[in-house]
Image (cartoon, rainbow, N blue to C red):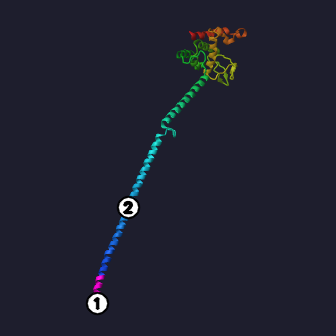
Amino acid sequence: MKKNTKKQLNKKKVIPSKKKKNVLVEPKKKNLKRVVKKAKVKTKAASKKTAKAVLKQKTKNVVKKSIRRAGKQDNHVLTFGEIHPASGKILLLIILIIIAFSIFLVQSMTRVEVKKEQPKVAGITSTRNIAREKEINDMVQGYPIEKMTRYIAKQEPKVAAFMIAIAKKESAWGDRKPVLDGEDCYNYWGFRLKSDRMGSGGHTCFDSPEEAVAIVGTRISHLVNEEKIDTPKEMVIWKCGYSCDGPAAAGSEKWIKDVDYYYKQMIN
């Protein structure tokens, strides 16, 4: 009985001790796992935050570098590549000067060409003579020659007077005029000089009123200034040439008289 009692007591003592050990050990393992899991979670969260912060900082750095590069490129737009900015500005200034000089040179050449196309005629003034224009217009108003008064008024007084007087006698100031293919030849002085364009009656055809006045005015200016012809009587060579006799002299007296009448109105 005693042995059995001891065995039972031993069993009772042993069993509780084992249970106590199991009860104490199991909670410790579970708590440790939880702690480890929490630590891992915290570590992962921290690492994620750290990675985000690093990525954000890198992004900022990249943006800053891009802005700086863009600023440098803007500041060196006019530096011509690798040339120093100061040298680039000097080079740009030289190029602008060359362009400006080229434009000036082209304009000068154009002016020279215009002057060649419209050569200055002896006895013609470069400015308009409004007073003389009005005087001539009052005399020839309504006649075809009226469109030429602006150019005739620029001639020397004697030349202009002869042009008006002779045109009155030769064509009635353009009412009787030579034509070419039905078009006006602008020749109101009976002027004959062989050219590519010849009108009716063997008279020269001009391309414009201005050309007509320039060419005829040059011829009369030569007679007045070089040959010293300054009267209608001497100017009769316009009608019949230097040897004004025979059949060619017919009507010369009347020519002189009519031309003299209008010449004096203009010259006085």
Give the position of the C terminus as an image quadrant: top right
- Name the residue at 34% across, 71% down: 30
**Residue 96 image point, x, y percent:** 52, 32
Location of residue 169 with respect to 112 vertically, above or below:
above
Secondary structure beneath label 2: helix
Dot 1 or dot 2, earlier in sequence: 1
| Crowding near the residue tagged with mark 2, few <14, some 14–19, many ≥20 C-alpha atoms within 10 Å | few
Residue 198, numbered circle: none
Quadrant of residue 52 in the image? Answer: bottom left
- Name the residue at 62% across, 11% down: 225
Residue 45, numbered circle: 2
Give the position of the N terminus as an image quadrant: bottom left
**Residue 16 image point, x, y percent:** 29, 81
Secondary structure beneath label 1: helix
Which kind of residue does numbered mark 2 sit on? Answer: Ala
**Residue 215 image point, x, y percent:** 63, 18
**Dominant secondary structure of the magenta stretch?**
helix
Judge whether residue 190 is colored magenta. Answer: no
Residue 3, numbered circle: 1
**Residue 167 image point, x, y percent:** 62, 15
Q: Nearer the viewer, residue 40 or 121?
A: 40
